Image (cartoon, rainbow, N blue to C red):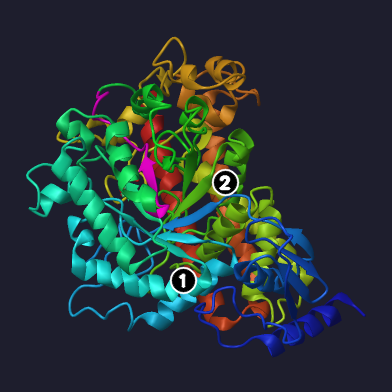
Amino acid sequence: MNKLGSIIILFVLCMTTAKAEDGSRLWLRSEMPTDITLSIDSTMPDDDGYRISGKTITARTQMGLLYGKYALLRGEQGESHPYFKYRILNHWDNLDGTIERGYAGESIFWSLTPAPSPRERGDHINKYAEACASVGINGTVLNNVNASPKMLTPIYINKVKEIADILRPWGIRVYLSVNFGSPKALGEVKTANPLNPQVRKWWKKKTREIYKLIPDFGGFLVKANSEGQPGPFDYGRTHADGANMLADALKPYGGIVMWRSFVYGAKHQGEDRVKQAVSEFAELDGQFRDNVILQSKNGPLDFQPREPYAPIFDQMKKTPQMAELQITQEYLGQSKHLVYLAPMWEEFFGYVEPSRLVGIAGVANIGLDTNWCGHHFSQANWYAFGRLAWDPTLTSEQIAKEWLSQTFGNEKGKMKDEEISTVITSLLLRSREACVNYMMPLGLHHIFKFDHHMGPEPDGFKADYPIEWCPVYYHRANKDSIGVDRSSTGTNATGQYREPYRSLYDNIKTCPEEYLLWFHRVPWTYRMESGLTLWDEIQRHYNRGVAEVDDFAYIWQQTKPCIDEQRWQEVDECLRFQQKDARLWRDTCLKYFGSFLK
Ligand code: GCW
């Protein structure tokens, strides 16, 4: 058959399978086989793992059987066990229904008055829970780390119970972010000093009240003395004093405290921001209770498209640690850009071995939008987070393929056209590097527009705000050079890393170019590996980023016959926006940086 003939047949095949789809079913569109055999084997390892042979699923627990069913659906055979004990979503949802850094509509849990109760939202929450369970997520923090003290009032604790009851059959425990100042803010004690007996008593009582309603409650997540949140420093106490007080209250029930290391501008104000977490926490290593876990963002700054790993993972030797990844794309085009994040997380695990962590937290990208995540392809990031939390050795490619076939394949998870599946997979895999290139190549960082973080503002400077919120602080471009000297001749941020990275990053000759301007201040005329000057290389990266997005848009055109109409259109619109936005990034940044070279 000639090529045209086969294209026509392919087209017809694809058309016959295309049905109206709006993304609301996520990756859960495949039919569960009816002839599955389930069996319990109490000799299996003591976790929620499973073994699949043909259509027989064996597990030690009921949850293992459930996880096994979804694994069977994605074509798995053999035995699999969860790598991390804690696989937790962090929702930055506010009690009025808004979501901090949420780009997919309002909260699925909370809403402004007249508030539908979680029970009325039950179907939705149930579907959410199924999606989480299908990839092995086993915990969820229901509210923003910038937490309202109201969260701990009886009316809200009752709502938490309703949500917990819906999530429980899916193996998902609820956790809450708590405001450290709660006892004082609620007017029940005059202080929130963690060593004050009244305060300690208040937290014990509150914790008892929660466990009475929710016996399997998971514990607390805390952002303290960071970005204006209250904390133990307010009373001259340490992070350990604060975390241990909460840990003591939770201990009798088996609960944990996840204490965040995302801090700057408090105790070490004026120090290079990327060094401050280690400065605040390293001296406390060994002082935390055993049910405290330190939760740190993957990079030392703030969820940038590319950051070196956070050296706090090297410095805390005795404290259990969790990594916090951001699924919602605050700095990666939000719900408008197609950026698949698994390659970024895979890169992180290449530096911070999963064996050093007890858990993974992911800042959720979920809201009430019909397709849950704003962009149809942002669903892939929710999926990938769960899969990596279960098994961090999975490759981005494998996860992309699984997600794609379940999300865009037929009801049996088969893509009609393997070639289309291959090109979309490669698009997904290229998308994060493309974003780095058109936004901030070669180690540039945080040159985002103020506050909302969508779009470029490399010249950003506002005298009224902390300097760490101003883009110019992060590149310091002038007529001679650009970048921040964080080597031993500068802020010595490199000194916080373990070897071999300390030496590798410290020396401009050995520092990987992708981190060059993060760690070094470099003359515009510096010769890069390519032989180009730094300035020419910067331009090349920005242009490459734009060309990549153009290619994604072109590829998407080719997929039209194989993708259902609504989703195809919506993705197409987003890609057109992304093309424009990539140009905006390139043109704004090159114009600004170029102005120093005139
Ligand atoms: O940089 C920031 C985000 C804030 C967020 C903070 C954090 C929840 O822009 O919106 O607050 O990180 O992680 O605490």
Q: Is residue 437 above or below residue 505?
A: below
Of labels 2 and 1, the one closer to you: 1
Q: 34 and 30: which one is in front?
A: 34
Is residue 206 one of those drawn in magenta? Answer: no
Q: Residue furthest right?
A: 1
Pinpoint residue 590: horizontal percent, then vertical percent.
Answer: 43, 37
* Label 2 – label 1 distance at C-alpha: 28 Å
Disc 2: CA contacts within 10 A as few (<14), some (14-19) or many (>=20): some
Quarter of the view holding residue 40: bottom right
Q: Which residues are magenta?
A: 253-269
Label 2 or label 1, whichever comes before in sequence order:
1
Pinpoint residue 545: horizontal percent, then vertical percent.
Answer: 55, 46
Pinpoint residue 104: horizontal percent, then vertical percent.
Answer: 38, 67
Q: Residue furthest top?
A: 489
- The C terminus - image quarter: top left
Q: 25 and 247: which one is in front?
A: 247
Can you identify the residue that label 1 sits on? 168
Check disc 1 and give the amino acid type: Arg
- Could one spot residue 97 in this view of the protein? no
Query: Which label number is shown at residue 345?
Result: 2
Q: Residue furthest front?
A: 252
Check disc 2 and give the amino acid type: Trp
Q: Is residue 167 above or below residue 547?
A: below
- Classify mark 2: helix, strand or loop: helix
**Answer yes or no: do the residues labelled 2 and 1 have beta carbons within 8 Å?**
no
Q: What residue is rendered at 50% in x and 45% in y? A: 438
Quarter of the view holding residue 560: bottom right
Q: What residue is rendered at 47% in x and 20% in y? A: 496
Q: Is residue 549 above or below residue 130?
A: above
- The N terminus - image quarter: bottom right
